[in-house]
């Protein structure tokens, strides 16, 4: 019986029929020829996130010829966060690696990650992208801004450029899976559970094939989810705006009253009144919007719906 420790590669896939065979071929070559994971045994967990192309068929082909390949196929698209959770939940390894199938998470880094976790005193080795060469300027700007904002607002700290590319010990994986919340933001969860982490910096790598599934709007929504999930300062901001508006309204009321006593009111104040009404109304809608974000997340949590539904698993 093989007593070697096992490492599980968790790989979310959504419409990745072009990138999947490149990923598998690259990993096999590096593991067998470059020994990037030492003498560890290994398995793959491909999570098909409701793909519309031939992704699941290709995964099944790999499974048919390689018993190290396992998969979970969702009943529909539940999103990358659900796919990551499914992979961590099903992985059986003593160590678990989460990485993207498009090879932007460079497999060559696994050797350094292995050294940090297996031979050094770290619970996790995590990749951090330090350049965004080849990425659109607007995406780079929004991404950098997100990390600045969330680190000011949240109680946790998320390293700028942090990826979901991680090499973790089982104890950390178990802690993450135990957080069964429906609204998941993995970057925040990784930081929240703690554990000793070594950051490994690398330069941006282009996709091996296919195109990104993350539009600007999806990234913006994902950023909002992260802020709402790990910070209540937006609620404090709403309260502060409300108090500030009340104070300004009170000062304005005194000013109008004193002016009327001293000079009367010969000029109709329709323009200024409309400006005040629009300003106050806008702030009220902003605060209601902030409250609704938190309420919607609470509403979804109280339903206790499953994070994903598996159509097939092997």
Image (spheres, rainbow, N blue to C red):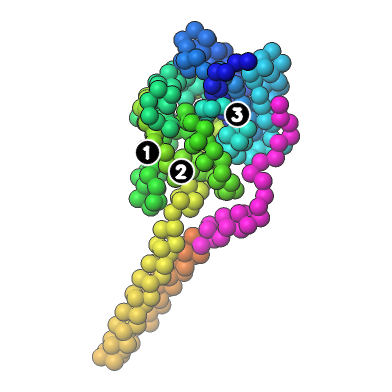
Label 3 sits on a secondary structure element that is loop
Is 312 a magenta residue? yes
The part of the image, by quadrant, that contains residue 143 is top left
Quadrant occupied by the N terminus: top right
The reply to whether the magenta stretch includes residue 76 is no
> What distance separates the C-alpha of mark 1 from that of mark 2?
15 Å
Q: Which residue is mark 2?
A: 193
In percent of the image, x 38 and y 75: which residue is there? Answer: 246
The residues colored magenta run 291-314
Who comes first in sequence, dot 3 or dot 1? 3
Q: Residues within 10 Å of mark 3 (few under 14, many from 20)?
A: some
Q: Residues within 10 Å of mark 1 (few under 14, many from 20)?
A: some
Identify the residue at image location x=44%, y=45%.
Answer: 192
Residue displayed at 46% across by 51% down: 230
**Is residue 109 among the parts visible in the rendering?**
no
Real-space Cα separation, disc 3 to disc 1, in angstroms? 28 Å
């Amino acid at each position: 019986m093989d007593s070697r420790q096992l490492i599980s590669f968790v790989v979310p896939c959504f419409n990745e029929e072009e990138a999947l065979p490149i990923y598998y071929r690259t990993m096999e070559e590096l593991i067998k020829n470059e020994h990037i994971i030492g003498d560890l045994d290994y398995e793959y967990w491909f999570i098909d996130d409701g793909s519309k192309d031939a992704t699941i068929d290709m995964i099944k082909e790999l499974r048919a010829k390689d018993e190290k390949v396992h998969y979970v196929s969702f009943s529909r698209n539940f999103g990358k966060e659900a796919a990551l959770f499914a992979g961590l939940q099903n992985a059986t390894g003593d160590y678990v690696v989460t990485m993207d199938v498009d090879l932007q998470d460079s497999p060559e880094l696994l050797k350094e990650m292995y050294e940090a976790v297996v031979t050094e005193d770290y619970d996790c080795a995590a990749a951090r992208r330090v350049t965004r060469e080849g990425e659109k300027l607007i995406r780079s700007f929004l991404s950098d801004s997100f990390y600045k904002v969330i680190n000011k607002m949240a109680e946790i700290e998320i390293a700028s450029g942090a990826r979901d590319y991680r090499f973790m010990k089982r104890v950390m994986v178990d802690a993450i899976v135990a957080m069964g919340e429906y609204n998941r933001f993995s970057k925040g969860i990784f930081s929240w559970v703690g554990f000793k982490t070594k950051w490994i910096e690398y330069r941006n790598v282009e996709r091996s094939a296919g195109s990104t599934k993350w539009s600007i709007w999806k990234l913006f929504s994902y950023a909002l989810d992260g802020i709402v999930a790990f910070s209540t300062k937006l609620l404090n901001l709403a309260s502060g705006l409300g108090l500030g508006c009340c104070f300004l309204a009170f000062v304005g009321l005194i000013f109008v009253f004193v002016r009327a006593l001293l000079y009367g009111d010969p000029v109709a104040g329709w323009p200024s009144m409309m400006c005040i009404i629009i300003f106050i109304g806008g702030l009220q809608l902003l605060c209601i919007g902030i409250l609704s974000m938190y309420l919607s997340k609470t509403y979804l949590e109280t339903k206790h719906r499953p994070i994903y539904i598996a159509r097939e698993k092997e």
